[in-house]
């Protein structure tokens, strides 16, 4: 019989079977043959049962090997890392190496080639990996969370206490950039390749802005798509929007700005073309509410007054809290833009590579992708974006109450 390395989970299973067999008068030899083990192996494992139970199920040995150089300073290491991450500071391999040199003289004496290997083994053992940050701020994240919980408590009580709120008219608006070149930074390549080339379009910085409106009931209102250009009735790009040959989706709205940004003039256009028609469906006794972030043109008095003149209450989300409190950021923007990226990748494979130089897609093509992505957005995803655990706009959760108390 050939010896094999067996996971600890399977060893413990064989030990349990051997104990039951012993009670029934069956020999350990028979149990070992059933599992295709050697009798001596099973006897040894039964003696090591306590050690096996303390080991990880997938490991194949109870011997943990030699103690690592950094093992004596493990508690100091993890406490140092935890305190930095609690304050929102990034921790890198370089910082870990410097801290290790400070805590361990033996580590400091190692060669520059050996140090990265020791650090990597320590990080792997404690389940620490290099991650891309999902949000960033200039303040301590704990203060941001406290501010967000304060705001959510205010909003949740505002929406739950007042029975005249209609979820079709509880709205959130935000704008997001859409680039004409959405090539990924990573690609499949052979292991060990010295060079990993990538293609980009001739205008990889070209972009537009898409203004997104959603409601608490799951409605996705028409978008305002802002391209780079001069805003006048005779402009070439403005004339494109109504040209039947270019087939811009007429269910959406279009505008231009010198830098393709949302500004005061385009905010007023979105109010007239999107909010005003939607408000015509509002019941007489309902109190509409619009959530906006602290983007410059959202705070302008002319914009806020124009929205309030339609009977809409405006609530501004505190700065730095949009990743926690803004429904568009929480559940809509990422899947919305991911679908646009997939459409761009399909277009790139089918049409973008026909010529030697990779050109960016046309404006009408990007407009069609935005409409398609919008139509593929699930109503449940929009509804869930308003009800994110303790940051729910419609429920005062235990964590929020506990913080407030």
Image (tube, grey):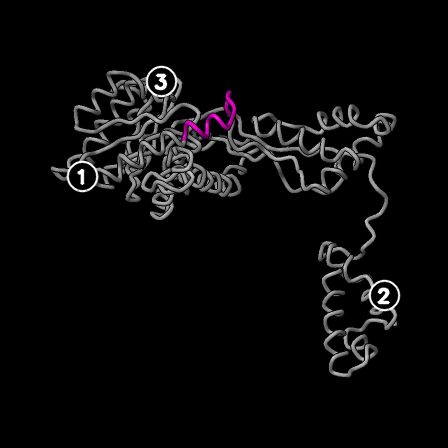
Residue at label 2? 44
Q: CA distance from mark 1 to mark 3?
A: 30 Å
**Magenta residues, start to end:** 137-148
Assess whether mark 2 and mark 1 are in contact (beta carbons under 8 angstroms): no
User: Which image quarter: residue 50?
Assistant: bottom right
- Nearer the observer, disc 1 or disc 3? 1
Question: Residue 192, position in %: x, y?
Answer: 76, 39
Category of crowding for the residue at label 2, using alpha-carbon neighbours closer than 10 angstroms: few (below 14), some (14–19), many (at least 20) = few
369 left or right, relative to 52 = left
Residue that extends furthest to the left in the rendered view of this protein: 284
User: Which image quarter: residue 377?
Assistant: top left
Q: CA distance from mark 1 to mark 2?
A: 73 Å
Category of crowding for the residue at label 3, using alpha-carbon neighbours closer than 10 angstroms: few (below 14), some (14–19), many (at least 20) = few
* Front position in the image: 108 or 241: 108
Q: Which tag, 1 or 3, sits closer to the chain's start? A: 1
**Residue at point 65%, 42% (across, down):** 188
57 left or right, relative to 244 = right
Q: Secondary structure at mark 3?
A: helix
Residue 296: give its label. Answer: 3
Residue at label 1? 164
State whether the magenta stretch is mostly helix, strand or loop.
Answer: helix
Q: Secondary structure at mark 1?
A: loop
* Front position in the image: 7 or 191: 7
**Residue at point 33%, 42% (across, down):** 395
Residue that extends furthest to the front in the rendered view of this protein: 405
Question: In the displayed structure, would residue 269 be above or below residue 64?
Answer: above
Magenta segment includes 145: yes
Q: Secondary structure at mark 2?
A: helix
């Amino acid at each position: 019989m050939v010896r094999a390395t067996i996971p600890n989970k399977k060893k413990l299973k064989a030990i349990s079977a051997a104990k039951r067999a012993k009670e029934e008068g069956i020999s350990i030899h028979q149990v070992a043959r059933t599992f295709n083990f050697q009798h001596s192996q099973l006897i040894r494992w039964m003696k090591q049962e306590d050690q096996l139970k303390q080991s990880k199920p997938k490991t194949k040995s109870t011997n943990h090997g030699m103690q690592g150089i950094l093992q004596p300073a493990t508690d100091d290491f993890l406490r140092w890392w935890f305190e930095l991450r609690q304050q929102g500071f990034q921790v890198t391999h370089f910082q870990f190496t410097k801290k290790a040199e400070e805590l361990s003289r033996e580590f400091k004496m190692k060669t520059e080639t050996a140090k990265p290997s020791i650090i990597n083994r320590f990080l792997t053992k404690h389940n620490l990996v290099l991650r891309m940050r999902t949000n960033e701020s200039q303040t301590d994240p704990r203060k941001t969370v406290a501010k967000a919980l304060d705001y959510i408590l205010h909003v949740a009580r505002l929406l739950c206490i007042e029975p005249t709120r209609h979820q079709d008219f509880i709205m959130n608006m935000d704008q997001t950039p859409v680039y004409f070149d959405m090539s990924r930074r990573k690609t499949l390549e052979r292991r060990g390749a010295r060079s990993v080339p990538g293609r980009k379009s001739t205008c990889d910085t070209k972009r537009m802005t898409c203004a997104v409106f959603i409601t608490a009931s799951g409605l996705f209102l028409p978008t305002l798509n802002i391209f780079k250009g001069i805003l006048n009735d005779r402009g070439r790009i403005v004339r494109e929007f109504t040209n039947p040959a270019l087939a811009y989706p007429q269910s959406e709205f279009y505008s231009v700005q010198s830098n393709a940004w949302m500004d005061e003039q385009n905010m007023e256009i979105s109010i007239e073309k999107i909010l005003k028609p939607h408000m015509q469906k509002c019941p007489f006794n309902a109190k509409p509410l619009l959530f906006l972030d602290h983007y410059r043109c959202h705070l302008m008095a002319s914009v806020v007054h124009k929205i309030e003149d339609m009977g809409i209450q405006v609530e501004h989300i505190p700065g730095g809290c949009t990743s926690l409190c803004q429904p568009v950021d929480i559940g809509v923007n990422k899947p919305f833009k991911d679908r646009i990226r997939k459409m761009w990748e399909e277009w790139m494979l089918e049409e973008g590579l026909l010529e030697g130089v990779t050109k960016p897609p046309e404006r009408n093509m990007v407009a069609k992708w935005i409409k398609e992505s919008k139509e593929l957005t699930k109503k449940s995803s929009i509804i869930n974006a308003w009800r994110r655990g303790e940051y729910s706009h419609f429920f005062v959760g235990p964590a929020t109450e506990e913080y407030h108390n």
